[in-house]
Image (cartoon, rainbow, N blue to C red):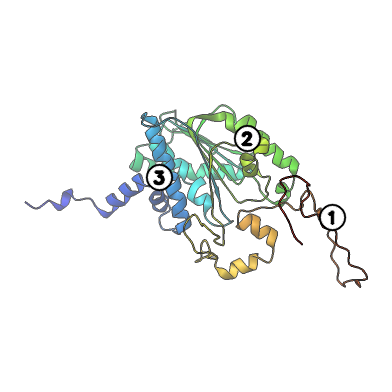
Amino acid sequence: MKASSKNLPTVEDIQREIARRDYYEYVCYVHEGRYKKAPHSEFVGRIIQEAMDKKKHMNVGEIQMENQYIAINMPPRHSKSMTITETLPSYYLGNFPEDRVIEISYSDTFARRFGKKNKEKVKQYGADLFDIQISKESSAHDEWLLDNEIGGMISRGVLSGITGMGADLMIIDDPIKNREEADSETHRSKIWDEWIDSFSTRLHPGAIVILILTRWHEDDLQGRLLSKEYGKPLPWQVYNLPLEAEEDDVIGRAVGEPLWPERYGLEFIQERKRYPSSFNSLYQGRPTAAEGNLLKRAWWQYYDTLPKMVHTIMSIDATFKDEADSDFVCI
């Protein structure tokens, strides 16, 4: 007996079901052709899906309840916000409608925009995909609830303060705005204090924390979170996606291969390499200090015309310390 065509799912039915089950497919679905697929963003989507699947197992007692800490480093203009910050909360609340989401960015304006983007996605797709809706009482973009009056989202600038709401999902997207903020130890310390005294105190048991950023400084929030100087580091899973592939690339690229060649190819890489410090930090995720403990930046001088070399003097200490177990060296 042949099945009636009336009972067969339509293409739209299949697409909806795939979007409901897989986060990366959801990202593509809700942007309706405006989202450009790429291997690096698919990799990020897979990381997020795995974290959410793990949380579901925790919630039913199959595995031990614990927080998940995920750090993702990406170059500028590689769709990190579109892939995560503008979209994940709406999908997360579809799967965990009684949970709370906190999103943080470098300014209230950006944070509010992220809140609005997610609110609009819930309004447009929430009922159809997940049977969720926005509460009629929620008019603000930076703080809203679902119609169950339990689950919801709050968005704030990194220094604006967060009170009154806990977090089952916390997303921190680019807490540093520019080079001026990055180079200010005072500003970096303010962000760190917010993490210690505010953000980390909001986390519910089993929370997912996602720090997604372009690296500006070795002492930025990620740098401090991973440094033993600031206490025993939490078990962060760190995924660095450099513009130019290096050894042991996390998405399997060959050394030298661009992260998103369709948009930022080899010519772009060579252009950015003209500025080594910027390239290493913003594009490769490997920020380095402007000076060290031994060599100070102020000592370096630049000349338009080289002076005449009268004498050359070399002073070398190849071991620094004279100890019994020092290695042999030669010059």
57 left or right, relative to 4: right
Give the crowd class for mark 2: few <14, some 14-19, many >=20 residues within 10 Å: some
Q: Nearer the viewer, mark 2 or mark 3?
A: 2
Q: Residue at x 72, y 54 (%)?
A: 328
Residue contact between numbered discs 3 and 1, judged by CB atoms under 8 Å = no
2 or 3: tag closer to the N-terminus: 3
Residue 241: image location, x then y, percent? 54, 55
Residue 225: image location, x then y, percent? 62, 39
Q: Secondary structure at mark 2?
A: helix
Give the crowd class for mark 1: few <14, some 14-19, many >=20 residues within 10 Å: few
Location of residue 67 with respect to 41 vertically, above or below = above
Cα gap from disc 2 to disc 3, whole angstroms: 33 Å
Instruction: Return the residue nearer the eye: 274 or 151.
Output: 274
Instruction: Kindly identify the amino acid type of the residue bearing the numbered disc 3.
Output: Gln
* Residue to which mark 2 is pinned: 195
Residue 158 is drawn in which quadrant? Answer: top right
Q: Which mark, residue 277?
A: none
* Residue to which mark 1 is pinned: 298
Instruction: Kindly identify the amino acid type of the residue bearing the numbered disc 1.
Output: Ala
Q: Which mark, residue 124?
A: 3
Q: Nearer the viewer, mark 1 or mark 2?
A: 1
Instruction: Kindly identify the amino acid type of the residue bearing the numbered disc 2.
Output: Trp
Q: Is residue 215 visible?
A: yes
Name, please, the residue furthest toward the left: 1
Cα gap from disc 3 to disc 1, whole angstroms: 57 Å
Residue contact between numbered discs 2 and 3, judged by CB atoms under 8 Å = no
10 left or right, relative to 219: left
Give the crowd class for mark 3: few <14, some 14-19, many >=20 residues within 10 Å: few
Instruction: Return the residue nearer the eye: 74 or 299.
Output: 299
Residue 321: image location, x then y, percent? 78, 47
Q: Residue at x 67, y 34 (%)?
A: 193
